[in-house]
Image (cartoon, grey):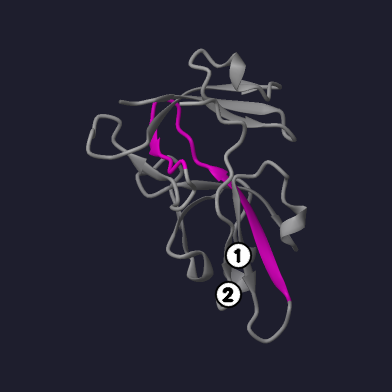
C-alpha cells in the first residue's frame, strides 16, 4: 500500500437531526457514525469500544472552521432555520487495535478484530508521532499525517 498523506473521509450532513444533540458533543467524546451521508446516524459510545469509529476533536458553527486535516465532520441544521453545529472528528484509533479503512472512502471506518481475515482493508495502529506530520517516519511507511495539527498515526496493513 502507498503511504497515505491524510485520512479524507466523506463529510456527513444531517439536515433533520437535532442541533441540540450535536451541541452536547464535547471534544474527546467518541461516536459511532454510520448510515448514508445525507441521513447519518450518530451515537455517543465509549472510546476504543467495538462501536466507536470517530472521536470529536472540535465543535464549531460551520464546516469551514474544522481543522483542515480533520478526518470528517458531522453537521446538523435545523429544519426551521440555518442554525446548526458542526462536529469535527478523527478516526478513533487505538494502538494495537485494527480498523477497516475503505481506500475509496465509500464507507465509514469500522473497528474490527485484527485476526478476522474475512474483513478487507484492515489496518493496525502501531504508533502515534507527536510534532511530526510525515508517514515516512513510520516504520511501515504507512499512516495518516495530520499537517495542520502536526501528528501522525502510523499503521500497518494486516494481511
- Against 62, residue 117 (above or below) is above
The C terminus sits in image quarter: top left
> Marks 2 and 1, Cα distance to the nearest angstrom?
7 Å
Residue 79 picture location, percent across and down: 63, 83
Direction bottom: furthest residue: 80
Residue 87: give its label: none
Secondary structure, mark 2, is: loop
Quarter of the image holding residue 10? bottom right
Q: Is residue 131 magenta?
A: no
In the rendered image of this protein, does residue 65 appear above or below residue 35?
A: above
Label 2 neighbour load within 10 Å: few <14, some 14-19, many 20+? some
Q: Residue at 72% of width from left, 32% of height from top?
A: 147
Q: Position of residue 108 (x, y in %)?
A: 45, 51
Q: Indicate left or right for 24 with 114 as reference.
A: right
Label disc, if present, on residue 18 of the rendered structure = 2
- Image quarter hosting the N terminus: top left
Q: Which residues are magenta?
A: 83-103
Q: Residues within 10 Å of mark 1 (few under 14, many from 20)?
A: many
Mark 1 secondary-structure assignment: helix
- 7 up-or-down from 18: above or below: above
Counting the numbered discs, the total is: 2
Q: Residue at x 69, y 71 (%)?
A: 84
Question: Which residue is rendered at x = 73% and y = 75% of the image?
Answer: 83
Question: Residue 100 lies in magenta, yes or no?
Answer: yes
48, 122: nearer the viewer: 122
x then y, percent, for residue 46 = 43, 47
Question: Residue 129's spot in the image, x, y percent?
Answer: 61, 21
Q: Is residue 140 positioned above or below 81 on the image?
A: above
Question: Marks 2 and 1: CB-CB under 8 Å?
Answer: yes
Mark drawn on residue 22: 1
Q: Residue at x 61, y 35 (%)?
A: 6
Amino acid at each position: 500500500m502507498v503511504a497515505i498523506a491524510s485520512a479524507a473521509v466523506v463529510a456527513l450532513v444531517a439536515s433533520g437531526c437535532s442541533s441540540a444533540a450535536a451541541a452536547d458533543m464535547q471534544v474527546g467524546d467518541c461516536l459511532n457514525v454510520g448510515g448514508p451521508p445525507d441521513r447519518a446516524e450518530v451515537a455517543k459510545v465509549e472510546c476504543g469500544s467495538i462501536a466507536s469509529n470517530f472521536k470529536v476533536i472540535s465543535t464549531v458553527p460551520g464546516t469551514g472552521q474544522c481543522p483542515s486535516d480533520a478526518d470528517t465532520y458531522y453537521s446538523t441544521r435545523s429544519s426551521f432555520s440555518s442554525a446548526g453545529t458542526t462536529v469535527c472528528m478523527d478516526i478513533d484509533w487505538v494502538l494495537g487495535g485494527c480498523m477497516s479503512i475503505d481506500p475509496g472512502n465509500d464507507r465509514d471506518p469500522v473497528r474490527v478484530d485484527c485476526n478476522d481475515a474475512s474483513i478487507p482493508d484492515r489496518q493496525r495502529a502501531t504508533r502515534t508521532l507527536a510534532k511530526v506530520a510525515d508517514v515516512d517516519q513510520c516504520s511501515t511507511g504507512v499512516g495518516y499525517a495530520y499537517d495542520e495539527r502536526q501528528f501522525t498515526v502510523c499503521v500497518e496493513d494486516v494481511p
